[in-house]
Image (spheres, rainbow, N blue to C red):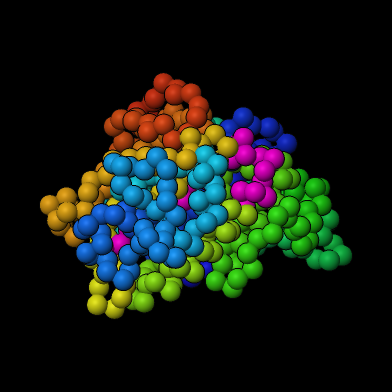
Amino acid sequence: MAGGRIGGLVFAAPHQPTTRDTLVVLFLRGGCDGLTLVAPTDDADYVAARGALRVENTGTNAGLLLSNPLANIDFRLHPKASALKELYDSQALAIVHACGLTNGTRSHFDAMDYMERGTPEDKNTSTGWLTRHLRAINPDAVLPAMAASASMPASLLGSVDAVATTSVPGFKLNGHYKYGPLQQDALRVMYNGNSILHRAGKSTLDTIAAVQAQNPANPYVPDVEYPTDSYVRGLVDSLKAIAQMIKLDLGLEIATVDFGGWDTHESQNGVISNMIDGLSRALGAFYNDLAAYHSRLTVVVMSEFGRRLKANRSDGTDHGHGNVALVLGGNVNGGRMYGTWPGLANEQLDNRVDLAVTTDYRTILSEILVRRLQNPKLGYVFPQIASYNPLGIVQGNDLPIDYSAGLYSTYLPHLQK
């Protein structure tokens, strides 16, 4: 989990334009410390609990002051997050604090599983929330998915349309150098049918042909300079590949990216400074690289849980609960913080040790689904959700919400196959 990778790319039908945004989900694996990324620097309980690990509000290394904070608290981004601060000040970036998984688990694997399946009380769900979203907006379509490894993220669990690739130019059929075209013709004959398997194979071949027809540059030449530091290289490579694919205008709908290494149990200050610096500059470069696509791009950044309020004896922080989420895009009501700040006094903490969760992470995703991805079928995407309470993070229309799980019940056997 230490590096970045493209977790999955999902396309609409090639050359079929869509009015929906491209959604990029960036998952910070390991439990990012939201109280360091976005810190309540003048909170007396925070100062007392964190000691030398805290972000300060004075001095040469003070955090970056945020306008429109929660509860009139002096919230500041980590001093290494200057690119995120620029996006925030330009009103492209919104911050949601004290959010996350309502299930109280402090297990990395359980928390990631619950979040990506979209069912916080059920780890046995056979599909991921992104898979269900894609089926809900067009249940009859075969939507090819691309992953950078042999496995898909749990958010795309149950997709029957997955193919693997490590780069955009490399997204092709690796056949015999001499007989490749004949092999492709043979595959088209094999997949000339109407079953799910036949349609998936034909769709994959069509998407490969569509990508290769665009003759993607190898290597990709971005419009801006990305960071080259070794600790962020994996994330940068993934974001570059997604940016290149978006620019091919082939109808990319969903991309997921992982950035691991946030499990800071010891010597946190040095590690997290590099991680935040890399995240900030890579995300800033990615957004600027796609300047022409801001009006139909939404990026959400989340992690499985935050870190404990009190520093441990190894100058680190242990697994916590509430955390921070970032939402970036041309239709984001940025430049302000969202959510409800619960406070950090002992009686306000979850189990008297952790930042409490006051905003369910599905509240954020639901608003993006409805307003930016035009999908009101929340009962299918998040089967346990009972209400729609947008925070106003993104612009768009609130469609009539469908809370029924009918689609989930109808297509579950299909997805399991």
Task: Say which residue appears at 49% left-offset and 62% top-offset.
Answer: 80
Which quarter of the picture shows residue 399? top left
Question: What residue span does the magenta drawing correspond to?
Answer: 286-308
Where does residue 13 sit, x and y in percent of width and height? 66, 37
**Residue 307 painted magenta:** yes
Which quarter of the picture shows residue 192? top right
Task: Say which residue appears at 25% left-offset and 73% top-offset.
Answer: 312
Question: Closest to the observer: 389 or 376?
Answer: 389
| Lateral position of residue 238 relative to residue 336, left or right | right
Where does residue 187 sit, x and y in percent of width and height? 74, 52
Confirm whether residue 112 shows in the render.
Answer: no
Task: Say which residue appears at 41% left-offset and 61% top-offset.
Answer: 62
Where does residue 128 sit, x and y in percent of width and height? 43, 47
| Lateral position of residue 214 relative to residue 386, left or right | right
Task: Say which residue appears at 75% left-offset and 58% top-offset.
Answer: 220
Q: Is residue 126 above or below residue 380?
A: below
Question: Closest to the observer: 13 or 216?
Answer: 216
Which quarter of the picture shows residue 345? bottom left
| Lateral position of residue 251 relative to residue 319, left or right | right
| Lateral position of residue 184 relative to residue 392, left or right | right
So how many labels did they put on this image?
Answer: 0
Question: Closest to the observer: 16 or 6?
Answer: 6
Where does residue 21 sit, x and y in percent of width and height? 58, 36
Residue at the right extreme of this rendering = 178
Confirm whether residue 65 shows in the render.
Answer: yes
Residue at the left extreme of this rendering = 347
Question: Closest to the observer: 155 or 291?
Answer: 291
**Residue 230 painted magenta:** no
Residue at the front extreme of this rendering = 59
